[in-house]
Image (cartoon, grey):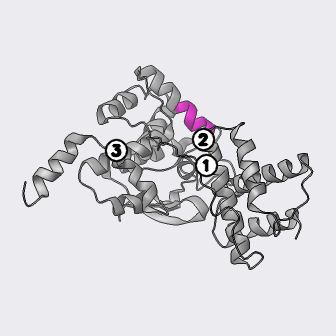
């Protein structure tokens, strides 16, 4: 089996069987391409079926000189997944990466915003300009529903089920989920659609897109980042803030106010509860309150 054939089959498996996005598939493929480049540079003649642990160990050792621990761990994880696929398809009997350990890395906790900081950011929006109502609705939706940027820009008018109190969101791997939407967020979306969006000349193909630019087309990810960056600078908040920060804040505030972790997982669209558990970094004061309120020997 040639490396090119193995990569092609693996990409097909990731897309069809695991439902991964194109970006995720590209990243997995890059890990294998990095290994192939190492083999070529060192004139190592081997195939995906015959490659042995000692060669992979040498590759990991050389890679560690060039990348940080987090990137090294990601490469190791990607190669383990690739060889697990080969074992699953009966191309190999064992995974040569099985006993190769990734470096220990600390879990990077996301920055979050307090409710007061979110209010300050929203207060910087100039509602006298046409894009003001839109930008307020964008921030309220990011925070009120905990959406990813890609989910926000892809949101359609036909995804809004305000009578039922939900929106339909298409997440990673084209997986759909229903997310509750509060009355406040609904109000600001309705203000935008009724007072601003209705007066735009909407380009063909964007008739159902919720958030539009001044030319009547779908907003880009970069534009959402720019909007947030400018508002944060005006607010004078000195944190590493991106659109994703509102998603982190959404989850953290729900958890701090007693929401169930499993419910938060479903709303965020996390495949694994382990991903959601990163939001357990809430302050110790809240944890003390939980013990004092619910433990039988409080």
Residue 84, percent from left and from top: 67, 69
Residue furthest front as drawn: 54
* Residue range (magenta): 219-227
Looking at the image, which is closer to me, 47 or 242? 47
Q: Nearer the viewer, mark 2 or mark 3?
A: 2
Residue 190, percent from left and from top: 41, 48
Residue 7, percent from left and from top: 80, 63
Q: Main secondary structure of the magenta part?
A: helix
Using the image, tell me which numbered label, if any, was put on residue 69: 2
Residue 36 position (above or below residue 237): below
Residue 179, percent from left and from top: 41, 60
Helix, strand or loop status at disc 1: helix
Answer with mark 3 or mark 1, whichever residue precedes in sequence.
1
> How much space separates mark 2 and mark 3, taking CA atoms?
22 Å
Could you tell whether 223 is left or right of 57 in the image?
A: left
Is residue 172 visible in the rendered image? The answer is yes
Could you tell whether 279 is left or right of 96 in the image?
A: left
The part of the image, by quadrant, that contains residue 10 is bottom right
Answer with mark 2 or mark 3, whichever residue precedes in sequence.
2
Q: Nearer the viewer, mark 3 or mark 1?
A: 1
Helix, strand or loop status at disc 3: helix
Residue 110 position (above or below residue 175): above
Is residue 201 visible in the rendered image? The answer is no
Residue furthest left as drawn: 297
**Residue that badge 3 annotates:** 281
Could you tell whether 89 is left or right of 178 in the image?
A: right
**Residue that badge 1 annotates:** 73
> Which corner quadrant holds the C terminus?
bottom left
Marks 2,1: beta carbons within 8 A: yes
């Amino acid at each position: 089996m040639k490396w090119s054939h193995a990569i092609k089959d693996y990409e097909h498996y990731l897309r069809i069987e695991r439902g991964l996005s194109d970006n995720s598939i590209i990243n997995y493929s890059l890990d294998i391409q990095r290994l192939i480049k190492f083999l070529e540079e060192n004139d190592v003649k081997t195939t995906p079926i015959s490659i042995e642990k000692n060669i992979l160990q040498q590759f990991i050792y050389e890679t560690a000189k060039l990348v940080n621990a987090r990137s090294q761990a990601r490469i190791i994880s990607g190669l383990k997944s690739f060889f697990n696929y080969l074992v699953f398809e009966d191309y190999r009997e064992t995974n040569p990466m099985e006993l190769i350990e990734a470096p220990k890395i600390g879990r990077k906790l996301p920055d979050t915003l307090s409710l007061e900081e979110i209010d300050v950011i929203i207060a910087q929006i100039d509602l006298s300009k046409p894009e003001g109502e839109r930008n307020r609705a964008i921030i309220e939706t990011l925070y009120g529903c905990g959406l990813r940027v890609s989910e926000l820009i892809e949101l359609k008018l036909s995804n809004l089920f305000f009578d039922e109190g939900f929106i339909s969101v298409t997440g990673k791997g084209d997986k759909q989920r229903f997310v509750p939407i509060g009355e406040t967020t609904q109000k600001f979306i309705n203000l935008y659609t009724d007072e601003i969006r209705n007066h735009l000349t909407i380009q063909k193909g964007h008739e159902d897109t919720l958030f539009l630019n001044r030319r009547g087309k779908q907003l880009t990810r970069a534009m959402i980042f720019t909007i947030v960056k400018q508002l944060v600078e005006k607010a004078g908040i000195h944190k590493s803030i991106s659109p994703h920060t509102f998603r982190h804040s959404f989850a953290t505030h729900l958890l701090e106010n007693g929401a169930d972790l499993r419910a938060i997982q479903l709303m965020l669209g996390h495949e694994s509860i382990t991903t959601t558990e990163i939001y357990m970094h809430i302050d110790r004061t809240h944890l003390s309150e939980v013990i004092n309120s619910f433990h039988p020997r409080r």
